[in-house]
Amino acid sequence: MGRKKGMDRETWWLNKKGYIEGRVFRSGICRQVKQARWLMEQHIDRELTRQEIIHHINGIKTDNRLENLEIMEYGKHTTNHCKGKKKKSGYQMNLPEQERIRRSEFMKEVHRRRQESDPTNSWYGQRKANKL
């Protein structure tokens, strides 16, 4: 078999994220699309909107059987994938209590000095004027 010539040819490869992606030529128009999306569009006989995502039910990115593909809205797809994740509440360091207090006091002093030297800070300006 040689290279398929004409306007109805397809070229597929595995992209960096593990999905099968390719170029599809139809009626003189070239589109670069993921294979799962292309197969679903052919199955439902219309183009998918930007808000429609193709979800792989079993989680295998290269398993593009129609039984394994599902159309989802973008937000619902994100919610579906984030269900079991634990949310972190910020940056945490494992410091001894003494070091944590030292750093806290240091930052309070830095903040105090910045506020006092800021000419736009009217509260500190009034405080200094009252002391005179």
Image (cartoon, helix red, strand yellow):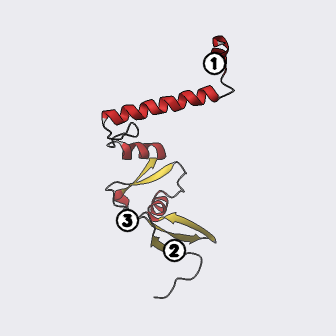
Quadrant assignment for the N terminus: bottom left
Mark 2 surroundings: few (<14), some (14-19) or many (≥20) residues within 10 A: some
Left or right, residue 25 beside residue 68: right
Earlier-in-chain disc, 3 versus 2: 2
Q: How many marks?
A: 3
Residue 99 vertical position relative to residue 32 in the rendered view, above or below? above
Answer few, some or many: residues within 10 Å of disc 1's Cα (few below 14, many 20 plus, some between 14 and 19). few
Q: CA distance from mark 3 to mark 1?
A: 62 Å
Q: Are marks 2 and 1 in contact (CB under 8 Å)?
A: no
| Residue lying at 54% horizontally and 70% vertically, measured from the top left | 24
Residue farthest bottom in this picture: 1
Above/below status of 85 relative to 120: below
Residue farthest toward the front in the current orientation of the protein: 132
Q: Which residue is mark 1?
A: 123
What is the distance, in whole Å, between disc 2 and disc 1 at their CAs? 69 Å
Which is more foreground, mark 3 or mark 1?
A: 1
> Pointer 3: what residue?
62
Query: What residue is shown with label 2?
Result: 10
82 in relation to 127, above or below = below
Pick the front one: 80 or 45? 80
Kind of residue at disc 1: Trp
The residue sitting at 47% across, 46% down in the picture is 73
Check contact, mark 3 vs mark 2: CB within 8 A: no
Which amino acid, by three-letter code, is at mark 3? Answer: Thr
Q: In terms of secondary structure, where does tag 3 sit?
A: loop
Task: Find numbered disc 1 in the image and state the secondary structure of the residue it sits on.
Answer: helix
Q: Amino acid at mark 2?
A: Glu
Is 109 left or right of 125, judged from the image as shown? left
From the image, which quarter does the C terminus lie in? top right
